Amino acid sequence: MAYNVIKEHMEKYLEGQIAKHTINAQVFIKNPVGVAEHPDTIATIEEELGKISEYKDKLAALNAIGYDYHEEELYKDRWQKSEW
């Protein structure tokens, strides 16, 4: 049942990326001190928000494609019929 394991790991990866970029945005909002690598605080926060949106969209897409099958045959049947 590798397809469930792969989906679970992909979900965890995407959720981790969302958490990482959320923390980054919060840090820049709470402590907007100029840093050499990030001279434009607003642009940096906007970048982080864009990344949060990107990973949330990817997570939604992953959940929409229907890999949540407990039986491999049901998964293969739907895949062969292209029902997604």
Image (tube, grey):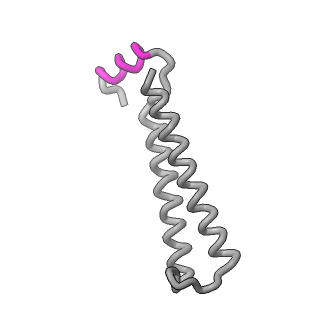
The residue positioned farthest toward the right in the image shown: 30
Relative to 55, does residue 81 appear above or below in the rendering?
above
The residue positioned farthest toward the front in the image shown: 36
Q: Nearer the viewer, residue 59 or 4?
A: 4
- Looking at the rendered image, the quarter that the N terminus falls into is top left
Residue in view at x 56 percent, y 81 percent:
41
- Magenta residues, start to end: 72-80
- Looking at the rendered image, the quarter that the C terminus falls into is top left
Q: Nearer the viewer, residue 42 or 20?
A: 20
Residue in view at x 47 percent, y 34 percent:
7
Relative to 54, does residue 68 appear above or below in the rendering?
above
Q: Is residue 25 magenta?
A: no
From the top left corner, tell me how far across and down residue 8 is, in percent: 52, 34
- The number of discs equals 0
Q: Nearer the viewer, residue 31 or 63?
A: 31
From the top left corner, tell me how far across and down residue 69 is, in percent: 48, 22
Residue in view at x 53 percent, y 54 percent:
17
Q: Is residue 78 magenta?
A: yes
Q: How would you classify the magenta stretch by its main secondary structure?
A: helix
From the top left corner, tell me how far across and down residue 13 is, in percent: 51, 46
Relative to 45, does residue 79 appear above or below in the rendering?
above
Residue in view at x 52 percent, y 85 percent:
36
Relative to 73, does residue 8 appear above or below in the rendering?
below
